[in-house]
Image: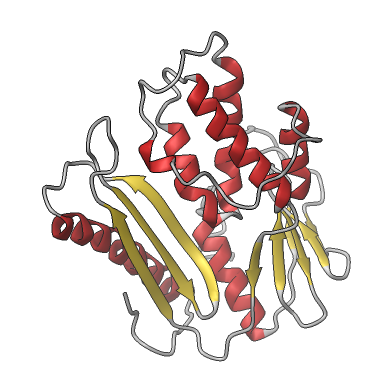
Amino acid sequence: MPGCDFKETFSPVVKPATIQTILSVTVSNGWQLRQVDVKNTFLNEDLIDKVFMQQPPGYVQYGHNGIVASRSSSGNIHLCQRKYIWDLLNKSSLANAKSVHTLMVNLSTLSKDEGDQLVDLVEYRSLVRALQYMVLTWPDIAYAINRVCQFMHAPTTAHMVVLKCILRYLHGTITYGLVFRWSDKLSLFGYANVNWGLDFDDRYSTTSYCVYFGHTLVSWCSKKQQVVSRSTVKAKYRSLVAATSDIAWLVSLLMELKLSFDNPPTV
């Protein structure tokens, strides 16, 4: 806006929760979507390309990893990474492998000493880094991805089996994704949980939480706590603090965007 912030520089990097919150508001209010694509990010030259365009009806694509957003006739938005998954399956030679419909149940019992050391570490590390982008639209694999990331320094054959199981799970649920549904009341609801001391290598607990805005999941997390909790109560309180902190940030975001919510946030 000339005279206000016309000469300010804005970073094009944004938190996924910001996009998901705005998409949730978009669906509930029946707004239309537009696409913005800046090709010369971080370059010191004038922008001469046209960067603002309207998407084809019912379809919009954004991001660098194939996140495709499609809009149904009812107004719901579905985020999917089908092409990105196919690329990973072809890269790992699992495109024709038998799919599975559940993740391995022994994820929490993985240990750094389980299995034999891998000779080639490049494939494991490359696939794990690529799978981290899947958490953007696949909240249910957040814990699994967090677990396999903890062994990137010295992966073993057992860790590779779990990694390929995740890929086979994605193969069987390739059309799944994140759905943004209409909601008559937009309020923040958070749910927090923790697995207490189930990491056999260091006995750290893992915090997990998810936050809904209306009927839509807009933020989630699964990560190890920074200290060892000597009781389940302490571990759960730390998980509760993490969820509350995220909700407090979402409240500040909504206030900054001049968006209101119907009821106080609930955790």
Observer-nearest of 265 and 251: 265
How many numbered marks are there? Answer: 0
- Residue at the image point whose x is 19% and y is 61% from the top: 237
193 lies left or right of 136: left
The answer to whether residue 72 of the structure is visible from this angle is yes
| Color style of the picture | secondary structure
Image vertical order of residue 78 relative to residue 147, above or below: below
Q: Left of 266 or right of it: where is 33?
A: right
Q: Single out the residue that lies furthest toward the top.
A: 119
Specify the quadrant that holds the N terminus: bottom right
Quadrant for the C terminus, please: bottom left
x and y percentages locating residue 125 in the rendered image: 54, 23
Measured as percent of width and height from the top left, residue 250 is found at: 40, 68
The image quarter containing residue 22 is bottom right
Task: Please give the name of the residue rendered at 49% of the width and 25% of the height, measured from the top-left corner.
Answer: 158
Extreme residue toward the left, this view: 230
* Residue situated furthest right in the rendering: 56
Residue depicted at x 70% and y 37% = 40
* Residue sitting nearer the eye, 249 or 118: 118
Residue 101 at x, y percent in the picture: 65, 52
Does residue 243 lie above or below 122 as drawn?
below
Query: Residue sitting at 60 percent across and 46 percent down?
Result: 134
Q: Is residue 194 above or below residue 11?
A: below
Residue 42 in view: no
x and y percentages locating residue 157 in the rendered image: 52, 20
